[in-house]
Image (cartoon, rainbow, N blue to C red):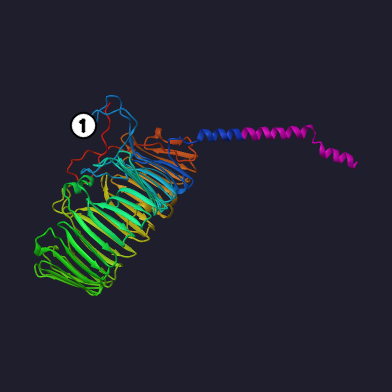
Amino acid sequence: MRFMQAASRQDPGPSRASGTGARRIVRGLALGALLGACLVSCAALDSDWHLAPIYSSQHRFDGGHTTEFAGGAVLFEDPPTVAAPAAGAKDASGKLLEPGEPRVRTARLINGELDERFGRKSRALRPLVAERWHADGDRTFEWLPPLGRTTWRGEELSSYFFPVYSARLTPENTKGRTFQMIVLPGFLWTQEADGTNHAAWLPFYGDLRDFLTFTRIQFVLFPLYLRTERAGNRTDSLLFPVLGYTRPLPEEEVTDPIAQLERRESHGWRIWPLYGHSRRENSYDRRFALWPILHWQDNHLERPEENHEKLRGVWPLFTSTHMGTYEGYTFLWPFFGWGRDPRGGFWALDAPWPLVRFQRGGANTGDVSRSRVWPLFSHMRGDNLEAWSVIWPFVQWRTESYVQSTRDSRYLLPFWRARHSVATASHRGGAAEGETLSRWRKLWPLWSEELEPGRHGLRRTTTLLPLNPLFEADFIDFHWAWAWQLYREVEDGPIKRERAWLGLWTRERNAAEDRRSLSGLWSKRVVDGPGGSYRETSLLFGLLRWRSSDADDDSGMLRPAFPGPGWPALEQPKPAPKPLSTPMVFPLAPEVEA
């Protein structure tokens, strides 16, 4: 009996086997139907996808496109483009265009300045690596910022990775195209335009051209032997800086183009620190003894004798300087000093420097006035600048006057920073006197606002939670702000762009359309164009979508577009033409005529 029961449990029988197979068929059909529905309901690849912080791909109303992964850590940003010109196509000025790839549509100010952020293209894995193309043609590549950076600026290239290496390729100039590289530990290499190479490996051996401020540097077992050439003169040193001898180069060996045009011969020698003497034709005559204690110098020898500068000093006890009607003295240099010049009523007092300084008058100083009792109080007026500070650096305000504008700055550190530029009566851009040209304000770490020239007048950028503690640093904002900014809004005339933390909320608006989206859950598109007005709504990752319109035959359900919202790309309407006298307008590049 027990054996039969066990056997019956092991053998399901024909009816139970057929039931299990039927259920498998039903599940397979259901799964196939679900997959088919998903394929049918997927959003088009060229439409808007908003599944932040995982992934988002959205078209901007300036004609550009932005793709983000991981809340903005991975960024693909493309500027607006126009179609590639066809054969024989001409621009608006009649210039013949060459066929090629689509061109970046860059925006420019009337006065020719470029708006970098409008024409920028970016590829980034933030904050580890990023490459950016700018509207002015520059390109930058950064890795492990701020340690590594490479910049292409026309034919010039500069690259560094601190502290490992630094390299620079200079464009064609009077000496041709040159290359220079510095690599740790102490290796230097330069290449001239004719392909000649020069190298150095500190401290063993070196032969370099046009390095630092010298025409040529040679050394063997530095500081055992060093030879330098500058401005047509040569200095040989043994056990640098102990023994040195300077004399002019033979005429045929002078390679410095400035020295060839205007040569000033130098002579000198030193046994440091005992005694040294150096003089340069029509420039200076200087001596020292028991360096740095005794100094006597005659400078500016190219001037009339009564205007030569004569300096005598017993460092650090006392130093005197006389030049024309000017006389100055220091005591315990550099802490205490006094100077005066009756011509112009100039006088200055340091007691002690840099804490206490007072200065007034002066025929050649632009009537500069300084009063400083640091850090309690400071005031400076002169050179078109007036600046105040109280309990430096916490409270500061300053006014800068230029030919076309005036800028006021106010700082209450670390919380409040602001600057405001307004046009003067002589502004050449057409702005009225007192009209705002730009403005920047930050209530750190809660809020910031910036007004700057845009495509439609002034562009306003508002940010909540701008944790960047520095004044203005696009470098920091680009690489890290995506992770901490709670909200950011950019408004440029009819174009408005909003982004919340990690891209969870976005909004894009222009004169004809308004798109708002809460990642995956809800999105709304409002269109008001010449063909009529309608509203489209997407819910639950684009699975439920419908349109509402004033026309009854244009309302109803829309095809699902997973993961939503599936809105199509839309090019920004062309702005109405404006006269060239209108200030701060970014006209688009002219469209190509076939």
One can see residue 384 in this view: no
- Estimate how packed mark 1 is, as few (under 14), some (14 to 19) or many (20 or more) residues with alpha carbons within 10 Å: few
Split into 4 quadrants, where in the image is the N terminus? top right
Q: 586 and 230: which one is in front?
A: 230
Question: For the point 70% across and 32% down, which residue is it?
Answer: 22
What's the amino acid at mark 1?
Ser
Q: Is residue 373 magenta?
A: no
- Figure quadrant of residue 172: top left
Which one is nearer the viewer's eye here, 70 or 45? 70
Q: Is residue 226 left or right of residue 424?
A: right
**Percent x, y of residue 78:** 37, 40
Residue at 77 percent across and 33 percent down: it is: 15
Magenta highlight: main SS:
helix
Q: Name above or below for residue 137 compared with residue 478.
A: above
Q: Nearer the viewer, residue 160 or 211?
A: 211
Q: Nearer the viewer, residue 573 or 156?
A: 156
Q: Quadrant of residue 82?
A: top left
**In which quadrant will I find the C terminus?**
top left
Q: How many numbered discs?
A: 1
**x, y percentage for residue 107?**
28, 41
Q: Residue furthest right?
A: 1
Q: Is residue 4 magenta?
A: yes
Residue 308 location (% of width, % of height): 13, 63
How far from the left and from the top, in percent, is residue 300? 15, 60
Q: Secondary structure at mark 1?
A: loop
Q: Which residue corresponds to mark 1?
A: 93
Highlighted range, magenta: 1-30
Name above or below for residue 367 compared with residue 534.
Answer: below
Left or right, 158 with respect to 267, comes to right
